[in-house]
Amino acid sequence: MIKIIITDDEQLELKSLEMMLSQYPEALTVKKANNAKQTFKHLETFDADLIFMDIKMPGEDGVTASKRIKAISPYTKVIMLTAHDEFTYAQEALRSGIDDYLLKPTKAKEIYKVLDHQVPLINKHKAEMICQIQSAFYKETSSLTEQAKDYVNKHLNETISVEYLANLFNVSTAHLSRTFKKETGETLVHFISKKKMEYAATYLVKTDLPIVNIALELGYKDTNYFTKVFKNIHNMTPSAYRKKHQ
């Protein structure tokens, strides 16, 4: 939905513009302002995509207000509303970065022509912003997953839990678990166990260390629990694995 502000000190012009905009085929949300001050008040809570701005109003004029709007929100489109005797002034405004102008009294045909040109540009910008946000989110989640993997691989001799990693990376356990599963297709708990048991298998085959010592080496104080985890990963007990690969 396109968000629009109409700024004009003439009530008849405001109502006329509002009525014509209501008949435009694309969905529009419209707010009205009588001067620049009201326009900036709207902008505090209303992220306008396009502003129709009268060139001459009591207080701050349209050109000055439009320059301020462009300074704080460069992608907001500003269309100047100007009378015939202000045409040169309007051209100057265009050189200052205003997007277009309409002669007053405004006509539906001209308004729709401007919208037909500006709305696709607005929608394109919104789509690009969504892509950038999604890209940033993907980069963040990928980075989180890689950080978790890297930490596990470098600290296999420690007791590692999802809660510990979440605190380490300053995220919730739910977010870390969900992100890891989405990125890798396996749970973080399974990944930790798998990596530890890969090293356990190496110890069993290449050393004569007792199973209790291997368990302690990988952060397991309970040998029975270590044996249970090993069996879940390798489908046999540590003793059976050592015997099979001797």
Image: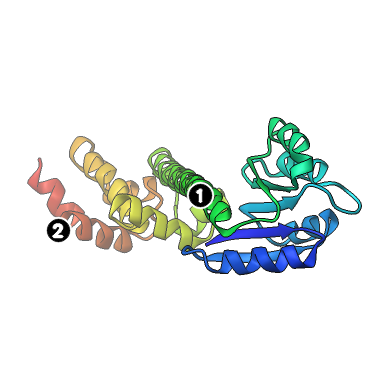
Residue 224 rendering spot, x and y as whole percentages: 30, 63
Q: Would residue 59 be visible to someone looking at this image?
A: yes
At a point 55% along the width and 49% down the height, the residue shown is: 114
Lateral position of residue 32 relative to residue 22, left or right: right
Where residue 29 sits, quadrant-wise, is: bottom right
Secondary structure of residue under mark 1? helix
Q: How many marks?
A: 2
Residue 38 rendering spot, x and y as whole percentages: 82, 60
Query: Vertically, is 206 above or below 244?
Result: above
Residue 189 rendering spot, x and y as whole percentages: 36, 58
Quarter occupied by the C terminus: top left
Question: Which circle's residue, 2 or 1, is located before the other in the chain?
Answer: 1
Which residue appears farthest toward the right when viewing the image?
Answer: 59
The residue nearer to you, when weighing 143 against 93, is 93
**Amino acid type of disc 1?**
Lys
Where residue 205 sits, quadrant-wise, is: top left
Lateral position of residue 106 relative to residue 223, left or right: right
- In the rendered structure, find residue 126 and report the number of the disc placed on it: 1
Where residue 15 sits, quadrant-wise, is: bottom right
Q: Colour scheme used in the picture?
A: rainbow
Q: Residue at label 2?
A: 235
The residue nearer to you, when weighing 125 against 241, is 125
Instruction: Please identify, in this view, whether the residue under mark 2 or under mark 1 is nearer the observer.
Output: 1
Q: How far apart are the alpha carbons under marks 2 and 1?
A: 52 Å
At a point 65% along the width and 67% down the height, the residue shown is: 18
The residue nearer to you, when weighing 159 against 116, is 116
**Amino acid type of disc 2?**
Asn
Neighbor class of circle 2 (other Cα within 10 Å; few <14, some 14-19, many 20+) is: few
Secondary structure of residue under mark 2? loop
The residue nearer to you, when weighing 190 against 158, is 190
Lateral position of residue 196 relative to residue 12, left or right: left
- In the rendered structure, find residue 6 and report the number of the disc placed on it: none
